[in-house]
Image: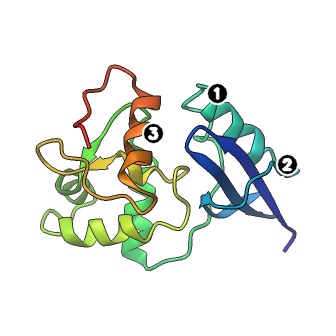
């Protein structure tokens, strides 16, 4: 497998994707700064997203590793459009497991391709942000970036 890195500087920190054979394998915020371009266009899609094209990540191909249940959750997450949110319970019901909101939360928390698989779009019933492995400030920023009119709770 040909492995490359795509990394962009963002207003909320450096973001890096590990790309293998043109497919995003993992992604997340990192402490190492700098820009790295890959040959598959992942860097360009990330840069476009942070520049305001919030749909730029939709076409990226991903290959996360996880259980069948987690794969189902992550696939459903990619169907939540930018600027929209869904609750853990709604996501569970949407995949045919209405009593599995906690399991959906676990799958969300172990998402290996953050942002591109948009786990930040999952909130608690009632509108509270819930958790985010890279910090609630980043989650709030991402949601506001995708929909500036969205009413977010103050942290």
N-terminal of the two: label 3 or label 2? 2
Q: Which residue is mark 2?
A: 37
Give the crowd class for mark 1: few <14, some 14-19, many >=20 residues within 10 Å. Answer: few
Please give the name of the residue rendered at 79% of the width and 60% of the height, measured from the top-left corner: 5
Q: CA distance from mark 1 to mark 2?
A: 16 Å
Q: CA distance from mark 3 to mark 1?
A: 12 Å
Q: Tag 1, which secondary structure? A: loop
Q: Tag 2, which secondary structure? A: loop
Rendering quarter of residue 48:
top right
Q: Nearer the viewer, residue 1 or 155?
A: 155
Q: Tag 3, which secondary structure? A: helix
N-terminal of the two: label 3 or label 1? 1
Residue 51 has which mark?
Answer: 1
N-terminal of the two: label 1 or label 2? 2
- The relative height of residue 6 versus residue 11 in the rendered view (above or below) is below
Q: CA distance from mark 3 to mark 2?
A: 22 Å
52 left or right of 45 in image: left
Q: Which residue is mark 3?
A: 142
Q: Residue 80 location, x and y as percent?
A: 39, 42
Please give the name of the residue rendered at 72% of the width and 61% of the height, measured from the top-left corner: 32
7 left or right of 36 in image: left
Q: Residue 143 location, x and y as percent?
A: 39, 36
Rendering quarter of residue 46:
top right
- The relative height of residue 7 versus residue 56 in the rendered view (above or below) is below
17 left or right of 11 in image: right
Q: Residue 75 location, x and y as percent?
A: 45, 57
Q: Nearer the viewer, residue 64 or 126?
A: 126
Rendering quarter of residue 29:
bottom right
Quadrant of the rendering where the C terminus is positioned: top left
Please give the name of the residue rendered at 28% of the width and 59% of the height, measured from the top-left corner: 95
């Amino acid at each position: 497998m040909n492995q490359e890195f795509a990394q962009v500087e963002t207003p909320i920190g450096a973001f890096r994707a590990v790309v293998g054979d043109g497919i995003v394998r993992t992604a997340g915020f990192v402490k190492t700064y700098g820009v790295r371009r890959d040959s598959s266009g992942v860097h360009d899609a990330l840069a476009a997203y942070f520049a305001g094209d919030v749909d730029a990540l939709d076409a990226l191909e991903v290959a996360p590793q996880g259980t069948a249940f987690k794969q189902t959750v992550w696939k459903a997450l990619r169907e939540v459009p930018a600027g929209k949110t869904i609750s853990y319970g709604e996501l569970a019901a949407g995949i045919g497991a209405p009593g599995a909101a906690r399991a959906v939360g676990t799958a969300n928390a172990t998402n290996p391709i953050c942002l591109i698989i948009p786990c930040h779009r999952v909130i608690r019933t009632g509108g509270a942000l819930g958790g985010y492995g890279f910090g609630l400030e980043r989650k709030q920023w991402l949601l506001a970036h995708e929909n500036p009119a969205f009413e977010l709770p103050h942290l």
